[in-house]
Amino acid sequence: MVKKIAILGSTGSIGTQALEVIDKQKDRFKIIALTAGNNIELLCSQIEKYKPEYVCIQSKEHVNYLQLKFPDTKILYGSNGLTEISSLNSPELFLVAVSGKIGLEPTIQAIKNKKNIALANKETLVMAGELVMELARKNNVQILPVDSEHSAIFQCINRRTDVKKLIITASGGPFRNSSEEIMKNANLDETLAHPRWKMGKKITVDSATLMNKGLEVIEAHHLFNIDYSSIKVVIHPQSYMHSAVEYIDGSIIAQIGIPSMHIPIQYALTYPDRVQGIETESFDFIKAKQFEFYEPDLEKFPSLKLAIEAGKIGGTATVCLNAANEEAVFAFLSKKIKFLDIYKITKLIFDSYTPIKNPDLEKILEEDIKIRKLTKEIINKGKI
């Protein structure tokens, strides 16, 4: 049977790789809707190729141009357009691959519409994990993880009542073996030079600070309903083992493969089936030679510790963490602050914040706006 899919974020790293997966299995999928930011040239080529019924772009500027060029496709824009697409009945699966908080509301709308979610947007669970997972349970909706680490855990978990520990791996990023002096003076190119994965700029910076791994711990807590004390992060520079599950009898089941996002994306799209699909290199244990594992250095990478602390506090503590960190990363990408200032600013905002327990969606979004405004003010004043 053909599975009908909507891709939110079709021109980004995950979205484009998802379409590569779909290209190898054209008989299995039909693209109903695509959404994108302002990469109009790439979006046009996707519309021509996949002929979606609906398209949503970030701003109104290109709507008329796209509608004239593609009269058989309904062109939408902005948050209202995303809401309309996430309310569609025809897609069976929504791949949420947009970056940032923009993914939260469409995900919730699609869940309310009883649609399964292939989730590649961290902010959805970091900002509103309890709310989203409870809503998914009430609507009998599957949240299928796309991140390689969470996909690995999802593939390894059998009976959750037998799970003792989740083991989440991290490559360690570009500064794993760097001195504090090097990190202090790290430029943008050095920070974006990830040793294993090709990702968007924001997530690559988060990987360099290990904040990304902290956010993944928060996601894992919500996705798998596992206490933070039972989630362990280990540094694995080769990125062969994507994560593992330890069971109460001491046995560990791990998911191993080459560092390729095509595999977890494909598994989320084809679940519960496994298919040959896109050609990926078979893992060669002989060529791999070694698997190294290390404890993360929380003194050198305090963002990981801060994220786990926020997760344990709960409520809007994770909203604060995410908003402050994201604005600090944007400032670094704009060359307004230095690399180590990302943590300093996030920590400063977090320490002065009083979290709200059991927030609804309105309160979550309200606090997010407030924190971002405060973070920008501190960055613009230059008093870090």
Image (cartoon, rainbow, N blue to C red):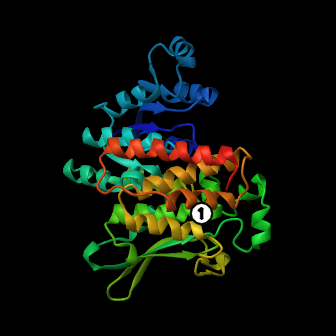
Left or right of residue 247, residue 76 in this image: right
The answer to whether any part of residue 171 appears in the image is yes
Q: Position of residue 238 (x, y in %)?
A: 64, 72
Q: Nearer the viewer, residue 294 or 218?
A: 218
Residue at 21%, 50% (x, y): give it.
140
Q: Which residue is mark 1?
A: 259
The kind of residue on which mark 1 rests is Pro
The answer to whether any part of residue 28 appears in the image is no
Q: Is residue 233 above or below residue 272?
A: below
User: Which corner quadrant of the image does residue 179 belong to?
Assistant: bottom right
Left or right of residue 339, residue 52 in this image: left
Q: Position of residue 299 (x, y in %)?
A: 62, 76
Q: Position of residue 213 (x, y in %)?
A: 53, 65
Residue at 46%, 39% (x, y): give it.
102
Give the number of marks: 1
Q: Position of residue 98 (x, y in %)?
A: 50, 42
Q: Residues within 10 Å of mark 1 (few under 14, many from 20)?
A: some
Please state, as top left, top right, bottom left or bottom right, where the C terminus lies in the image: bottom right
Left or right of residue 110, residue 235 in this image: right
**Helix, strand or loop at mark 1:** loop
User: Which corner quadrant of the image does residue 182 belong to?
Assistant: bottom right
Please state, as top left, top right, bottom left or bottom right, where the N terminus lies in the image: top left
Residue at 44%, 64% (x, y): give it.
310
Q: Is residue 119 above or below residue 37?
A: below
Q: Nearer the viewer, residue 187 or 354?
A: 354
Residue at 64%, 26% (x, y): give it.
41
